[in-house]
Image (cartoon, helix red, strand yellow):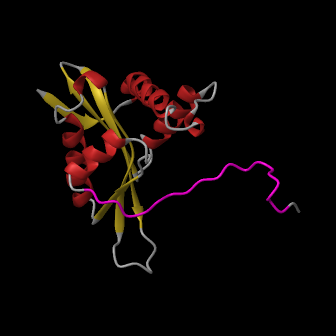
């Protein structure tokens, strides 16, 4: 049976290992995701801070005391020029590969959704790489809709660029 709960400091090494594996997987999409020499330590530091911040939430799913996945979520106020008030943003979600396609990712998302609703959120968001078709399929099956496209350009001198 899977248990979903708030993470603790003791969970951070396992969470960072899961995150790092996901980061390496994302490297096949583009070099932007290539890990830095201290990426695990930086991520752990960020999560450590998140555990003590009121608008950041780290949930783990575990089976037999083994962490099989996590979700890092953020509750943030939407600018008052928009009708919706609080957004629940999924910053990171990872399920160990051997536990994927078994409903555990859906349970993590639904758990965060229920938690966020109790906190007053009325919309959810996340970013997913356009080449990560497995994740996109997962999100669409769970009711998410494509809304925006993020565009990125490396900043490197090129012949057609204007130099100041």
Residue placed most toward the observer, 120 or 34: 34
Q: Residue at x 21, y 46 (%)?
A: 111
Residue 160 is a magenta residue: yes
Horizontal side of residue 163 vs 6, given as left or right? right
Residue placed most toward the observer, 28 or 99: 28
Quadrant of the image occupied by residue 144: bottom left
Q: In the rendered image, is residue 59 in sight?
A: yes
Q: Position of residue 105 (x, y in %)?
A: 24, 38
Horizontal side of residue 118 vs 15, given as left or right? left
Q: Position of residue 152 (x, y in %)?
A: 59, 53
Q: Position of residue 84 (x, y in %)?
A: 33, 73
Q: Residue at x 62, y 29 (%)?
A: 36
Q: Residue at x 27, y 49 (%)?
A: 139
| Magenta stretch, overall SS | loop
The region drawn magenta spans 144-162
Q: In the rendered image, is residue 121 in sight?
A: no
Residue placed most toward the observer, 35 or 148: 148
Q: Position of residue 72 (x, y in %)?
A: 38, 42
Is residue 72 depicted above or below 98 in this figure? Answer: below
């Amino acid at each position: 049976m899977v248990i979903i709960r708030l993470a603790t400091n003791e969970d951070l090494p396992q969470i960072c290992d899961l995150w790092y594996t996901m980061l390496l997987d994302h490297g096949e999409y583009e070099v932007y995701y290539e890990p830095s020499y201290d990426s695990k330590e930086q991520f752990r530091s960020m999560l450590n801070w998140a555990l003590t911040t009121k608008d950041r939430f780290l949930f783990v799913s575990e089976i037999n005391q083994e962490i099989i996945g996590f979700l890092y979520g953020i509750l943030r106020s939407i600018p008052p020029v928009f009708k919706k008030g609080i957004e629940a943003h999924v910053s990171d979600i990872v399920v160990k590969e051997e536990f994927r396609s078994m409903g555990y990712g859906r349970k993590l998302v639904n758990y965060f959704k229920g938690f966020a609703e109790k906190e007053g959120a009325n919309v959810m968001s996340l970013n997913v790489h356009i080449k990560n078709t497995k994740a996109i399929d997962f999100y669409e099956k769970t009711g998410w809709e494509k809304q925006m496209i993020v565009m990125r350009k490396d900043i490197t001198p090129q012949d057609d660029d204007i130099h100041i």
